[in-house]
Image (cartoon, grey):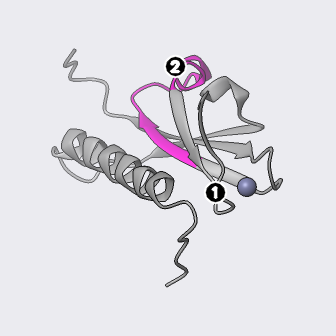
Amino acid sequence: MLVENTAHTYLHLLVFQCPQCGDPISVPMLSEVRSLEQADGTTCKLACSCGYSREVLGIQARRHYVEPWPRLHEHDQSHAEGLEARVQAETKKKIDRPDQARLD
Ligand SMILES: [Zn+2]
């Protein structure tokens, strides 16, 4: 799993379209690989401000952007996990309270 040379992280930004209101829903994820296949096979939790929520595969995104993402420290692995946990927590919060979207 740990290979010294894999010093790159990539941001995969998947943009879905809400089938209910048509708004874009973006799902960022960090990956060790640049190829789209892994993100395409990842389950994404969509949570739209209109209350729509669903789990879909990454391949269902309308757009899929990939950018090199600079690493900050050697802690980047935990950083990536922290980001993922934060995104999931945020998503969960929205699903739990779909009708209480706060704008502050
Ligand atoms: Zn929506």
Q: Amino acid at mark 1?
A: Gly
- Give the x, y percent position of residue 88: 39, 46
Instruction: Name the disc covering residue 38, or none.
Output: 2
Quadrant for ligand 1? bottom right
Quarter of the view holding residue 74: top left
What is the x, y in percent for residue 32? 39, 28
Which residues are the magenta region? Answer: 27-42
On screen, residue 54 versus residue 63, left or right, reads left
Does any atom of ligand 1 lie closer than 8 Å to the CB of label 1?
Answer: yes
Q: Residue at x 81, y 56 (%)?
A: 21
Tell me which residue sits at (35%, 52%) in the image: 89
Q: Earlier in the sequence, mark 2 or mark 1?
A: 2
56 or 6: nearer the eye? Answer: 56
Q: Is residue 11 left or right of residue 81?
A: right
Q: Residue 28 magenta-drawn?
A: yes
Q: Dividing the image into 4 quarters, which one contains the N terminus?
A: top left
32 magenta-colored: yes
Category of crowding for the residue at label 1, using alpha-carbon neighbours closer than 10 angstroms: few (below 14), some (14–19), many (at least 20): some
Residue at 41%, 50% in the rendered image: 92
Residue 7 x/y as whole percent: 31, 33
- Which amino acid is tagged 2? Gln
Pointers 2 and 1 in contact (C-beta within 8 Å): no
Q: Is residue 23 left or right of residue 89?
A: right
Q: Which residue is mark 1?
A: 51
Helix, strand or loop at label 2? It is helix
